[in-house]
């Protein structure tokens, strides 16, 4: 492989969207990668290749096309197993994304394992998809939802976890490995160790972590693990739920229908082997194939290199952004404890105005509550501006952003 720096400089050419201009011929500076990432030709072409050359349903027919489609679909499962270091491919379930993965757990595990008086613990910096399914479940069952608080540096207060575990009523602790607003990297090992000692299961929302750093499930020792393809160069509508086999075997099906059954009679049915018991109906074959191409692309770069690139960008961005007049950056400045997501506000300037002004210069940043209203309440704001990096971002992108934000500061006389 080429040197790391030239790898990152060269790969922009693989992304057709980065070649276009926006807003009167301005270079596109895409800084909303926590929301979704752009797709390289390798991913786009693999999807087109499936539809052009071997489109057919999987797992059913014996003809050549069906065999090729089944092989491509199942190959992605193997690629994912290697990517996150899972030994048993039966533990990997394809879902639409992190949201569906967590809802699957709340439904297929939660409804048979949670009862009145039980406690589910989440954190103050979760995405709504790791809060609302648990609200639905705990309300239905007469159970309780509790929160691990966050300090002003954006770190979880683990004394809260100790307090809940001491009740002996906690059945599940669920947390994101990287916050989609503050970029905080959660100390998962510490949480899991405490939970294991108390016999409590753990779920990791890895939507923001798997795309940006090496993750090893053999070492992590959680019980449920969820992430989305579209945040790591893959297509929308495809993601992964991994469940430890011993737990998966205790779960009821999520959706009923084709492919998830072994036999169906008038009033009874039996279930297919894992993981197919949890993959009812015709799956998202084309996007599973595209997801496989995204994994290949990231594997070739190396996830340690991805992390290193983003650490460099984040460090540079925090330095430069801190010099902009009137800006407040949320979360820790300790780069070892955060990913490439930076939320900020200007006093008295609405984040939507900030996003609109920088958009005029071709810079895509996100403004709003980022599907994390519990965190917004904790920060005592309605919204923030957020920038988030990926492999194709450069220091030039950050310079353009800082330039534009200096204009915002000037316009609002900060
Ligand atoms: C931390 C986190 N969890 C869950 C989700 C939901 O992912 P999806 O919309 O792909 O289901 C997101 C998306 O932004 C996220 O950032």
Image (cartoon, helix red, strand yellow):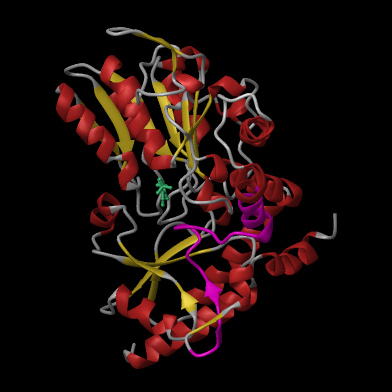
Residue 347 visible in image: yes
In the displayed image of the protein, which residue is found farthest to the front?
Answer: 63
Name the residue located 30 percent from the left edge and 42 percent from the top edge: 149
Q: Quadrant of the N terminus?
A: bottom right
Q: Residue at x 64, y 49 (%)?
A: 294
Question: Which of these two is toward me, 168 or 339?
Answer: 339
Give the image location of residue 391, x and y in percent: 64, 60
| 291 lies left or right of 174 | right
Quadrant in which the C terminus appears: bottom left
Q: Is residue 302 above or below residue 66?
A: below
| Residue found 49% across the figure and 12% down from its top | 246
Quadrant in the rendering for residue 349 = bottom left
- Side of 164 where 278 appears, left or right: right
Q: Which residues are magenta?
A: 24-49
Instruction: Judge whether residue 50 is colored magenta.
Output: no
Residue 368 in percent (x, y) is at 31, 65
Residue toward you, 350 or 89:
89
């Amino acid at each position: 492989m080429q040197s790391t720096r030239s790898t990152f400089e060269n790969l922009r050419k693989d992304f057709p969207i980065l070649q276009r201009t926006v807003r009167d011929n301005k270079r596109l500076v895409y800084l909303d990668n926590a929301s979704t990432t752009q797709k390289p030709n390798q991913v786009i072409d693999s999807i087109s290749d499936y539809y052009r050359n071997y489109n057919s349903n999987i797992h059913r027919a014996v003809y050549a096309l069906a065999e090729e489609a089944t092989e491509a679909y199942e190959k992605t499962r193997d690629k994912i197993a290697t990517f996150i270091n899972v030994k048993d491919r039966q533990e990997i379930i394809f879902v639409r994304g992190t949201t569906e993965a967590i809802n699957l757990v709340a439904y297929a595990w939660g409804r048979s394992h949670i009862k009145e008086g039980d406690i589910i613990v989440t954190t103050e910096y979760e995405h709504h998809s790791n809060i609302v399914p648990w609200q639905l479940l705990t309300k239905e069952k007469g159970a309780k939802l509790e929160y691990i608080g966050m300090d002003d540096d954006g770190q979880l207060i683990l004394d809260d976890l100790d307090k809940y575990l001491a009740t002996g009523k906690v059945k599940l602790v669920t947390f994101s490995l990287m916050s989609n607003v503050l970029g905080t990297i959660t100390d998962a090992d510490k949480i899991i160790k405490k939970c294991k000692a108390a016999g409590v299961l753990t779920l990791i929302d890895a939507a923001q972590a798997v795309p940006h750093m090496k993750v090893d499930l053999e070492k992590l020792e959680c019980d449920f693990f969820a992430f989305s393809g579209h945040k790591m160069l893959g297509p929308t509508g495809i993601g992964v739920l991994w469940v430890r086999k011993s737990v998966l075997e205790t779960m009821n099906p999520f959706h009923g229908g084709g492919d998830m059954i072994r036999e169906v009679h008038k009033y009874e049915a039996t279930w297919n082997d894992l993981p197919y018991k949890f993959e009812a109906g015709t799956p998202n074959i084309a996007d599973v194939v595209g997801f496989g191409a995204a994994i290949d692309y990231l594997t070739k770069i190396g996830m340690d290199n991805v992390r290193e690139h983003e650490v460099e960008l984040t460090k540079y961005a925090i330095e430069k952004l801190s010099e902009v007049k009137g800006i407040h950056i949320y979360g820790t400045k300790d780069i070892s404890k955060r990913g490439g997501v930076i939320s900020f506000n200007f006093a008295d300037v609405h984040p939507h105005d900030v996003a609109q002004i920088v958009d005029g210069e071709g810079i895509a940043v996100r403004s709003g509550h980022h599907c994390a209203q519990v965190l917004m309440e904790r920060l005592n704001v309605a919204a923030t501006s957020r920038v988030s990096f990926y492999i194709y971002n450069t220091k030039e992108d950050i310079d353009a952003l800082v330039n534009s934000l200096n204009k915002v500061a000037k316009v609002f006389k900060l």
